[in-house]
Image (cartoon, grey):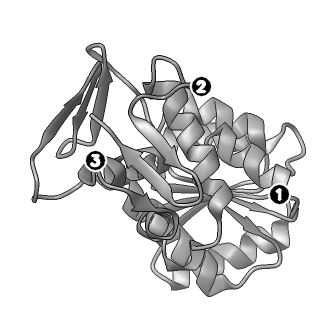
Amino acid sequence: MKVLVVDDEPGLAHALAITLRASGWEVATASDGAGALRASAAQTPDVLLLDLGLPDMSGLDVITAIRAWSRMPIVVLSARQHGEDKVDALDAGADDYVTKPFAMNELLARLRAAVRRAAPALGGEEAVVVAGALTVDLARARVERDGSEVRLTPTEWSMLEVLVRNRGRLVGRRQLLQEVWGPGYSDETHYLRVYSAQLRRKLEDDPAHPRHILTQPGMGYTFEV
């Protein structure tokens, strides 16, 4: 697996590269936003590890630019610990957010989880679920709305997949967080708010009055066909 590390702190980028290579990753690095965009297009990494505080542009702008053409998993690594910074990054299209200082084993686990979410399902159920104008192909990890493909990020797809596989049934908040992000995320309920809103904007005719992705207050979410 290849990871692109984007950070303008040479010491940290070097230390991350050494540790990641020792853990079996192929590593590329960039020190600014322009370099991140060039390397993302030229080297097609499996996951992007991105600092928000870059010298030439906002990390949020990097995320937005990449999301215009790629579903590549993006894990933000930032010293900004405010909740609104996390929400802004997730809302822009990031898949996860890790704050500095961090434990290396946790960062490695989050990178692995981001890559797993991006991987297509292998074997198993070959179901195509039709819900109004939506067609969800679980085997091909593909969604169409009115016959046109909808581009989802890996995390958006992973959340939708869990809901669709459990269609008509309540998926509790803790269960959804653990299945999509992993066991260390059971209290990160703001992730669910951000990603359910993103899915509704992309999939619902009226996101303010959703028909398919429904919130059960204080409990969880359901997908209705």
Quadrant of the rendered image containing residue 134: top left
CA gap, disc 1 and disc 3: 32 Å
Query: Mark on residue 208?
Result: 2
Answer left or right for 37 relative to 222: right
Q: Residue at x 60, y 86 (%)?
A: 105
Q: Position of residue 88 (x, y in %)?
A: 76, 44
Q: Marks 1 and 3: which is nearer the front?
A: 3
Please tell me which residue lies in front, 115 or 88: 88
User: Residue 152 shows which numbered tag?
Assistant: none
What whole-number distance in Å separates the C-alpha atoms at marks 2 and 1? 23 Å
**Residue 42 location, x and y as percent?**
51, 39
| Quadrant showing the C terminus | top left
Of marks 2 and 3, which one's residue comes earlier in the chain? 3
Question: The N terminus lies in which quarter of the figure?
Answer: bottom left
Disc 3 residue type (three-letter): Gly
- Quadrant for residue 180, please give it: bottom left
Residue 157 position (above or below residue 122): above
Q: Nearer the viewer, residue 64 or 25?
A: 64
Mark 2 surroundings: few (<14), some (14-19) or many (≥20) residues within 10 A: few
Which amino acid does the dot numbered 1 rest on? Gly
**Placement of 130 over or under 106, stated as above or below:** above
Q: Amino acid at mark 2?
A: Ala
Q: Nearer the viewer, mark 2 or mark 1?
A: 2
Camera-side residue: 219 or 201? 219
Disc 2 on helix, strand or loop? Answer: loop
Does residue 122 appear to the left or right of 9 in the view shown?
left
Q: Which mark is residue 83?
A: 1
Where 214 sits versus 178, above or below? above
Instruction: Please give the residue where the numbered disc 3 appears in the rendered image.
Output: 168
In the rendering, at what x and y percent does residue 28 appear?
59, 59
Residue 166 appears in the figure: yes
